[in-house]
């Protein structure tokens, strides 16, 4: 499971879904749009521990680039109870 919060300016956008290539590409587009429209971006992402491999596969290039460009990026891996 994926829960992301994109904060920019005075807005916050919550994105929920399964960890999949499509959803992570959609998240990327939302982040890019927020950065273009509202300036600095803060992205917080929570994923289940069993989704780490898929998450890395689809964010391995763009997520570090986003952080290097000045966005605040937080990723939390949730452990099963």
Image (cartoon, grey):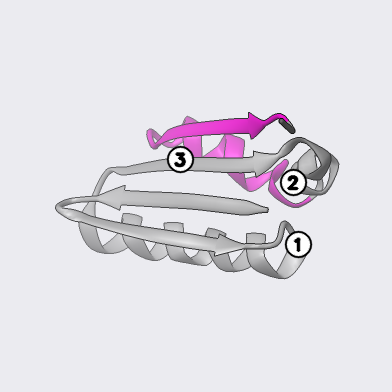
The answer to if 74 sits in the magenta stretch is: yes
Residue at left offset 56%, top offset 33% = 75
Image side of residue 7 versus residue 47, left or right: left
Relative image position of residue 20 (x, y in whole percent): 76, 62
The answer to if 43 sits in the magenta stretch is: no
Q: Which residue is mark 2?
A: 55
Q: Which residue is mark 3?
A: 44
Relative image position of residue 80 (x, y in whole percent): 74, 33
Q: Earlier in the sequence, mark 3 or mark 1?
A: 1
Residue interval drawn in magenta: 58-79
Q: Residues within 10 Å of mark 2 (few under 14, many from 20)?
A: some
Nearest the camera: 56 or 48? Answer: 48
Q: Residue furthest left?
A: 10
Q: In the structure shown, which secondary structural element does the residue marked by tag 3 occupy? A: strand
Relative image position of residue 27 (x, y in whole percent): 54, 61
Q: Earlier in the sequence, mark 2 or mark 1?
A: 1
Q: Identify the image quadrant of residue 78.
A: top right
Q: Which residue is mark 1?
A: 20
Q: In the structure shown, which secondary structural element does the residue marked by tag 1 occupy? A: loop
Dividing the image into 4 quarters, which one contains the C terminus? Answer: top right
Q: Earlier in the sequence, mark 2 or mark 3?
A: 3
Q: Residues within 10 Å of mark 1 (few under 14, many from 20)?
A: some
Nearest the camera: 7 or 36? Answer: 7
């Amino acid at each position: 499971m994926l829960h992301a919060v994109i904060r920019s300016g005075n807005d916050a956008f919550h994105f929920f879904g399964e960890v999949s290539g499509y959803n992570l590409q959609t998240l990327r587009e939302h982040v890019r749009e927020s950065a273009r429209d509202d300036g600095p971006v803060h992205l917080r992402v929570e994923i289940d521990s069993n989704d780490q491999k898929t998450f890395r596969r689809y964010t391995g290039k763009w997520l570090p680039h986003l952080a290097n460009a000045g966005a605040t990026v937080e990723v939390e891996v949730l452990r099963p109870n």
